[in-house]
Structures are given as structure tokens and as C-alpha cells.
Amino acid sequence: MKEFEPVKEGKVREIYDNGDSLIMVATDRISAFDVILKNKVTDKGKVLTQMSKFWFDYTKSILPNHMMSCSVDDMPEFFHTEEFEGRSMLCRKLTMIPVECIVRGYITGSGWESYKKNGTVCGISLPEGLKECDKLPEPIYTPSTKAEIGDHDENIDFERSITVLEKAFPGHGREYATTIRDCTIALYKKCAEYALSRGIIIADTKFEFGIDQNGNVMIGDEMLTPDSSRFWPAEGYESGHGQPSFDKQFVRDWLKANPDSNYDLPQDVIDKTIAKYKEAYKLITGSELDA
């Protein structure tokens, strides 16, 4: 049996080269504030993979994505183990676009902090009088650069994103920058409307895109998971203060309240975190998490 080693390891994911495709494995690692925590959150990788699968299927009419299969039966024998079951995705190879495509439908987090200071979010002027966690009149696109592990992403404006992409894809900078901006907004609107019908507010999220061998833009990486999004329960939503969440904001809040934790979570925080991830999965997909 051929042995495989990851060709790339991110904060959460490991990437394996499978010749003309890739196998992306979501581990149970969890990161916050650009730091990989000491703990693992059991089944978290399965939630990320299965939720991404749901959204990839749901949005393929808007834009193709890199997913080929989530069944290990379609992967080499090395991946036919419990370690990889449910958390592995066979993917098309893409040249990833070096911009994180962030879309905000509600004002919260760093956006709210910025707005309180000068009425803007990532340089975009917003109406006066907004309260924390208010829904924005229209979703806003606030791209950022992709940082290496341990570094912080840098917020950039649309014009700067054109410059970044022109450097990466000469002659296609404005074309690709415009496409990923427009697709980010369209994907968010479609998915946020659906999620709301299932009892979840998607306050904000990020998408990542890549270019296939024919020059087509596709969705890559993960999609609308609790790791890459803010999910709030629609029931009880009220602006003017922070919201309870189904995502790792719960972990961030605990870390802020416990600055001497050395990024080591107690078991009850781990248990509550995966319970929130699984609850979000069930609400959105209507089914329990696959084994």
C-alpha cells in the first residue's frame, strides 16, 4: 500500500497530493487568533468536511467548486481508515487566489470596533447610528491578504486586491478580482437566505477561490463552516449587544476572558464547542452528522 505524507499543513487542514487531484483532510485541531490551540475537538474535522460538502452541492449552480468526492472509497487505500473517514475530500487541483474573500452582512467583531472609531469598516463608510450586530443595508465585501501561520491577515480594499491578483495572474487582475467579489456577494446572499430559513443567521463568512487549468474561477478550501463564519441563532436575535453563536467565537471569548490559559482549553469548553458545531450542522442540513 502506498504511504502518503501531507504536502501542506494549515492550521486545521492537511493536504495530500494524489497525482491529478488533491485529498484535503480536516483535522480536529482548532485555531484562534492565528494560533493553533493545544487541544483537539473530537469530530470537528467531520463537521467541517460534511458542512462544506453540503454548501458545495447547494451552490454549484452559482459557481463550480473543487469537490470531487467525500467518500474514501474513491481515494487510495491509505485513506480507508477511521482516521480519514468522514473528514476527507477528494478535490480538483486549483491555483489558489492569494486573497481571502470576506463578506459581512452584520456589523460585529473587528468591524464593529472599527465602526465605533470612525464610522467605517475596512475603509467602507456605513450609515450613522448602527448598533452592534445590526444587519447592514447590503452585505459588504472586505477582502484580506492570506497570511502564513502565525502572521495576521491584512485587510485590503478592492483596488488593492486588483494589484495583488495582477501580480499573481498577469493580465487577469481586474477580471479575477471582480469575479471573486461578485461571486462572494452572490454566494453569501443565497446561503444566508437559506440558513435563515433554518434558524441560523450567517453574520459574516469568508470564501477562498482558485483557478482551474482552463482559467475558470472555482470555490476552493472550505465553505460556510463554523470555522470560517459567524453563525448566530435567529431565535432571540436582538441587535445592540453581542450574540450567542454556533461557531468558535465561543472559544475566542473564553480565551479573552482567560488570558493566562496559554491556549489550553478545559474539557467543558471543548465539549460545548463541538456540541455547538454539531447543532449548527443539524440545523442547516436537517440531518445528524455522518460517522
Image (cartoon, rainbow, N blue to C red):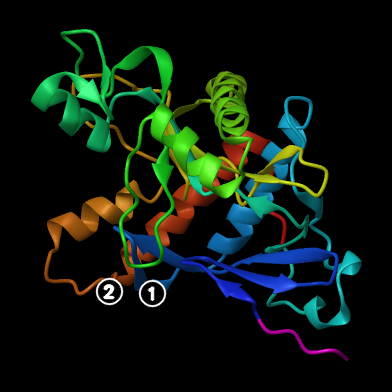
Q: Residue furthest front?
A: 171
Foreground: 144 or 285? 144
**Mark 2 secondary-structure assignment:** loop
Question: Residue 39: x and y, percent?
Answer: 38, 74
Alpha-carbon span between mark 2 and mark 1: 6 Å
Q: Are marks 2 and 1 in contact (CB under 8 Å)?
A: yes
The answer to whether residue 115 is above or below residue 247 is above
Residue 31 position in % (x across, y down): 38, 63
Q: Nearer the viewer, residue 64 or 46?
A: 64
Location of mark 1 (residue): 39
Q: Is residue 219 left or right of residue 136?
A: right
Visible residue check, residue 222: yes
Q: Quadrant of residue 8?
A: bottom right
Q: Give yes or no for residue 167 being in the magenta stretch.
A: no
Is residue 261 found left or right of 207 in the rendered image? left
Q: Which of these two is toward me, 97 or 284?
A: 97
Disc 1 secondary structure class: strand
Residue highlighted by disc 2: 264
Identify the residue at horizontal 64%, vertical 46% (top origin). Answer: 51
**Residue 208 picture location, percent across and down:** 57, 44
Q: Amino acid at mark 1?
A: Asn
Magenta stretch: includes residue 4: yes
Amino acid of disc 2: Asp
Camera-side residue: 18 or 198? 18
Category of crowding for the residue at label 1, using alpha-carbon neighbours closer than 10 angstroms: few (below 14), some (14–19), many (at least 20): some
Which region shows up in magenta?
1-5
Quarter of the view holding residue 72: bottom right
> In the shown orientation, is residue 27 left or right of residue 62?
left
Q: Main secondary structure of the magenta part?
A: loop
Q: Earlier in the sequence, mark 2 or mark 1?
A: 1
